[in-house]
Image: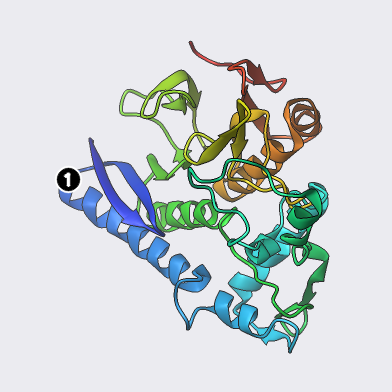
C-alpha cells in the first residue's frame, strides 16, 4: 500500500486529500472522485454564481418560496436544528450581515456605536428561514435576507468527498478542507491518524496532536483576520445577537463524528466564550472541543486526551 496525497484549491480554500491505496495511479483516481464531488457541492451551495440554488433562494427573499433539491433542503433542515441547539449562535442567515459596516482592515481603530452595530445584523434570524417539508421549499421571510453556507459548507463537502472516495474503494484516508478535516481508517502501520492542532500564535505550526480514526476535526480561529483596539483582540466573527465582533477566544477545535457538525459547532463555541462553550459541549454526546483563549490558556472538554 502507498500513501497518495494531493493538494488543490476548492470552494476558495486549500483542500488536501490523502489515501492509502494499492498503487499511485489508483490512489490519484480515487482522489479525483473526491475532488469532483467537492466541485459538485460547491456548485450547489456557492453565492459566487448567479445560477446557484443559494442565490435563487436569496433573490426570492420576501417574495416567494423556492423549490430546491432534496439534498439542499436536508442541509438547510439540519442547519436549522443546529441553530435551535445553539440558540441562534449558528445561523445560515448570517449571510444577511451588513458587510460594509464591518470592514476588518487596519483602518478600523474603534468599535462602532452599539445601536448601529445591532442594526447591521437585524436581518439575521434563523426563525425567518421557512421550510416546507412536503413541497421541499425554502423561503426567506424578509426582503434583503440572505443565507450562506460559510459555517457548514466545507464540512459538508468533506463528508460527501469521504463518502464517494469510500465508494471508490478507499478504506483509509483523510479529506482536509482548510481547517475542517475528516479522517477514516488507519495509517499504513495500523495506527490511527495523527492530527496536529493548529497553534493560533504561529501559523503553519501546532501545539499538540490527537490520534483519531473515523472522526472529524474542525478548527476556527481569529488568527487569520482580526483587529486590535485598546489592546483587545476582536475576531472577524460577528455575534449575530449583538452585531459586535467576538473576543476572548483565539481558537476553537471541535472533534466529532462528521465534518459538517464539527464545522457548524466551531463558530457558536467562539461566540459563547470559554465557560459557556465548554459547558455546552460537555452536555453533548460524542462532541469534544479544545479552546485557546486570548491569554493563550488551553481548555479541553471532559473526554479529550491530547498528546503533547
Residue beneath disc 1? 24
Q: Residue at x 45, y 38 (%)?
A: 183
Helix, strand or loop for disc 1 = helix
Residue 221 lies in quadrant: top right
Residue 201 shown left or right of residue 97 in the figure? left
Q: Residue at x 74, y 54 (%)?
A: 117
Q: Locate residue 307, reporting x and y percent.
A: 50, 13
Q: Locate residue 299, reporting x and y percent.
A: 66, 19
Vertical side of 123 occupied by 272: above or below = above
Q: As drawn, which residue projects farthest toward the top?
A: 308
Q: Residue at x 44, y 72 (%)?
A: 43
- Most foreground residue, 184 or 248: 248
- Most foreground residue, 85 or 243: 243
- Most foreground residue, 225 or 68: 225
Residue 145 lies in quadrant: bottom right
Residue 48 lies in quadrant: bottom left
Residue 13 shown left or right of residue 76 in the figure? left
Q: Locate residue 237, reporting x and y percent.
A: 62, 46
Vertical side of 130 occupied by 295: above or below = above
Amino acid at each position: 500500500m502507498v500513501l497518495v496525497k494531493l493538494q488543490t484549491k476548492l470552494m476558495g480554500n486549500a483542500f488536501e486529500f490523502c489515501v492509502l491505496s494499492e498503487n499511485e495511479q489508483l490512489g490519484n483516481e480515487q482522489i479525483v472522485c473526491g475532488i469532483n464531488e467537492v466541485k459538485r457541492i460547491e456548485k450547489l451551495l456557492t453565492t459566487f454564481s448567479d445560477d446557484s440554488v443559494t442565490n435563487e433562494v436569496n433573490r426570492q427573499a420576501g417574495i416567494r418560496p423556492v423549490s430546491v433539491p432534496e439534498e439542499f433542503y436536508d442541509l438547510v433542515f439540519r442547519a436549522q436544528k443546529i441553530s435551535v441547539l445553539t440558540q441562534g449562535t449558528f445561523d445560515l442567515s448570517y449571510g444577511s450581515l451588513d458587510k460594509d459596516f464591518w470592514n476588518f482592515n487596519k483602518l478600523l481603530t474603534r468599535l462602532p456605536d452599539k445601536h448601529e452595530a445591532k442594526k447591521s445584523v437585524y436581518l439575521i434570524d434563523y426563525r425567518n428561514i421557512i421550510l416546507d417539508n412536503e413541497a421541499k421549499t425554502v423561503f426567506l421571510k424578509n426582503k434583503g435576507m440572505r443565507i450562506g453556507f460559510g459555517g457548514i459548507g466545507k464540512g459538508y463537502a468533506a463528508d460527501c468527498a469521504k463518502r464517494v472516495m469510500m465508494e471508490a474503494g478507499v478504506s483509509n484516508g483523510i479529506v482536509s478542507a482548510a481547517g475542517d478535516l475528516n479522517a477514516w481508517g488507519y495509517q499504513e502501520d495500523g495506527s490511527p491518524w495523527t492530527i496536529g492542532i493548529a497553534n493560533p500564535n504561529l501559523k503553519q505550526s501546532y501545539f499538540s496532536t490527537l490520534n483519531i480514526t473515523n472522526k472529524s476535526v474542525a478548527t476556527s480561529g481569529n488568527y487569520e483576520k482580526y483587529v486590535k483596539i485598546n489592546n483587545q483582540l476582536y475576531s472577524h466573527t460577528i455575534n449575530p445577537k449583538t452585531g459586535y465582533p467576538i473576543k476572548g477566544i483565539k481558537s476553537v477545535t471541535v472533534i466529532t463524528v462528521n465534518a459538517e457538525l464539527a464545522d457548524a459547532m466551531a463558530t457558536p463555541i467562539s461566540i459563547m466564550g470559554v465557560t459557556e462553550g465548554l459547558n455546552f459541549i460537555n452536555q453533548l454526546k460524542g462532541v469534544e472541543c479544545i479552546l485557546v483563549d486570548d491569554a493563550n490558556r488551553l481548555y479541553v472538554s471532559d473526554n479529550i486526551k491530547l498528546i503533547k
